[in-house]
Amino acid sequence: MTDRYAVIGNPIAHSKSPLIHAAFAAQTGEPIEYGRILGNPEDFAGDVRRFVAEGGRGLNVTVPFKTDAFELLEDLSDRARSAGAVNTLIVRDGGLLRGDNTDGVGLLRDLTENHGFALAGKRVLLLGAGGAARGVLRPLLEASPARLLIANRTAAKAEALAAEFSHAAAAGDFALSTPAVAKVAVTAEGVVDSRAGAIATDAEPGRGKAQQPASRQPTSVALQGGGLDALVGERFDLIINATSSGLEGRVPEIPADCLAEGGWVYDMLYADQPTPFCRWGQARGAARALDGLGMLVEQAAESFWLWRAVRPDTAPVIARLRGG
């Protein structure tokens, strides 16, 4: 029996997710089909209900519906709660939906596993304080950099985001278990509250045996937020661009010398050619200038594992998308 999955967004025709998941399915032998859904901005819940009623087993959620998905569900992973957004919906038996967010783990796996960047003890600058930045903040803190500075054109937004995560950063306090919460069933008839009960940890897939996270010692992180003017005189080992400035051909207005010698830059946007931010890094001697294509594939692989309890090999898929 073939299980149905899809990505929902608006616009959606450009999405590479069907290509990525088709490659995962061919590689693993998992019997799935994966399509696109052009979501209705006025009726996201209705689109989800129809998909579930027609037998759908899981959805990826993209712009502009990640916060809609978060608000729709009560059964959420810790990382979805931290992000305030959902990009993966898991349909459980009986039509119960669980929401997760795989963006942050996608970024971390691309940086650390694909490219070998060790975040522990590093000075990290995160540009932007919107949904993209929020979605990766918790995983970045869990990787124990020495310092993480959130910088935004509007300083108050960066300061507020840093304040929200400040206690956890100081204590290294990111619990991986989730208390019992009310689940929500999304059916063709509507959103229906279901029984309360213990739910899975972030590490549990949609089916099969859970993988337990490796034990680690909490490590405090110096977390700060501020405006772009606060970067004068600062140096960072890694600068991550979580803004959308590249879509307009721009680069955030940061000091030309804030990248430390041997530092890396990472743009969460991706393109066939180096993004404006990657070119900015290259012009300033970055050891590596990476775009977000690897993050895209890695977050998809995490979704695939949550749904199928099988983790695909991402390297050949990234190479194919690169044209290699």
Image: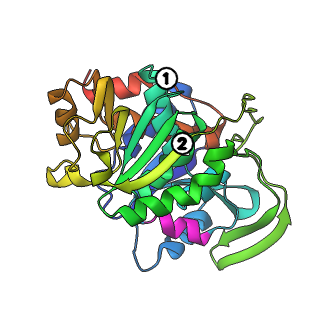
Q: How far separated are the C-alphas under marks 1 and 2? A: 17 Å
Asked if the magenta segment contains residue 69, the reply would be: yes
| Crowdedness near tag 1: few (<14), some (14–19) or many (≥20) residues, C-alpha within 10 Å | some
Q: Which residues are magenta?
A: 65-72
Q: Secondary structure at mark 2?
A: strand
Report the residue at 20% width, 23% height from top.
285
Asked if the magenta segment contains residue 136, the reply would be: no
Q: Amino acid at mark 2?
A: Ala
Q: Nearer the viewer, residue 114 or 157?
A: 157
Q: Position of residue 2 (x, y in %)?
A: 58, 44
| Crowdedness near tag 2: few (<14), some (14–19) or many (≥20) residues, C-alpha within 10 Å | some
Q: Position of residue 212 (x, y in %)?
A: 76, 32
Residue on which disc 2 sits = 222
Tag shown at residue 31? none
Q: Position of residue 99 (x, y in %)?
A: 62, 57
Tag shown at residue 118? 1
Q: Secondary structure at mark 1?
A: loop
Q: Name the image quarter holding residue 304.
A: top right
Q: Amino acid at mark 1?
A: Ala
Report the residue at 76% width, 36% height from top.
210
Q: Name the image quarter holding residue 180.
A: bottom right
Report the residue at 59% width, 71% height from top.
72
Q: Is 27 on the left or on the right of 246, as rendered?
A: right
